[in-house]
Amino acid sequence: MRALASEGTRYPWYVAPAAVLVRFLLAAVLGTCRVVEVVGEERLEELARSGRAAVFTFWHNRSNFCGYFLRKRWLGAGRSLGIITSLSQEGEIAARTARAYGLRVARGSVGGGGLSGLKALHRMVRKDGVSVLSVADGSRGPVYQAQPGVIVLAQTAKAPLVPLSYVASSCWRLLSWDRMIVPKPFSRIAVAIGEPIEYPERLDKAEQGRAQAVLKETLDGLTEKARKALGL
Amino acid sequence: MSDSPAQAVLEILARETGVPPTKINEATELVGDLGIDSPRALQVLVEIEDKLDIEVNDEEVANLRTVGDILEVVATRFPA
């Protein structure tokens, strides 16, 4: 279990300009995309009306635009949003980028024995009432396999788990473990938001396994809905 | 009904892992001996926090390796 980054953690000089470059690229690429349809948009509105903090979840390879979308639609509407980023240099770049956008950031690891990261997210949701973003297949995969972490996070924080996905009319696939999807500039995008999932206070091992299977089906189904909405 | 905070911790660990309380001691490792992964550890920790009405801070969370580590944290909240 890794420690959370301390205030005094130092990173190489290029981390700060890299974070600026990432913001520029996000604006240049994702900022030019056009969201043409949001399937289940009313679910976001209902959630906002409820005043409850939520755990938003999506596949890792769709995290860039899902995060971007929620920053616009959730944070942009005056609600709070938080994430966790790793202690690596990449995590620091992500943290600086997220903070610049107004997201609350906790540092730590969620995958690979990352109790500290999960606990930090849990505190954000349950104690501070901040909605958080958390990938369903974890930071290391396997891709498209829901991990228990995000379910336990929602369950213990007594918060709804809100699945979402998107499809772009045109995209690049990076050579990362999850074949990260990057929409091409000026793409049309459809986003699909699922029904918030509430978990009981306790889940035994079998129930946990079923919950993971249902989450996978739900996220895959949302991707399919988004694809249909784009007419693909 | 638990007699002490320490006993409450052991009961929660036993219930969550299926390991009898008599086989859990301070040296028992959370991962190696009880097979607790991070999601399960979060469940255990939150249950302990709720039951004892305490909060475990980030630094303490990062240093939890054994049952003794948990008991030590709990002991700081309930000084004898």
Image: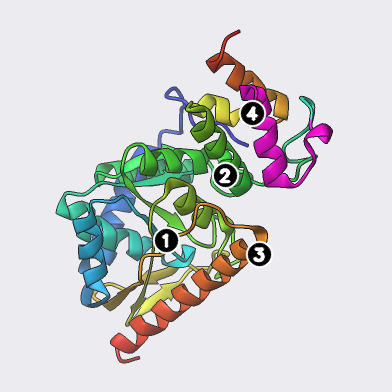
Looking at the rendered structure, the kind of residue marked 1 is Glu
- Callouts 1 and 4 close, C-beta under 8 Å: no
User: How many numbered discs sit on the rendered protein?
Assistant: 4
- Mark 4 is on which residue type? Ser
Residue at 62%, 27% in the rendered image: B63
Q: What residue type is labelled 2?
A: Gln
Q: Mark on residue A206?
A: 3
Q: How far apart are marks 2 and 4 (CA)?
A: 19 Å
Mark 3 surroundings within 10 Å by alpha-carbon count, few (fewer than 14), some (14 through 19), many (20 or more)? few
Both on one chain, marks 1 and 3? yes
Question: Along the horizontal axis of the image, is A105 left or right of A60?
Answer: left
Instruction: Please tell me whether residue A36 is drawn above or below residue A103 in the rendered image.
Output: below
Q: What is the chain letter for disc 4?
A: B
Highlighted magenta segment, given as a residue range? B1-24
| Labels 1 and 4 share a subunit | no
Relative vertical location of residue A51 with respect to residue A34 in this rendering, above or below? above
Q: How far apart are marks 1 and 3 (CA)?
A: 17 Å
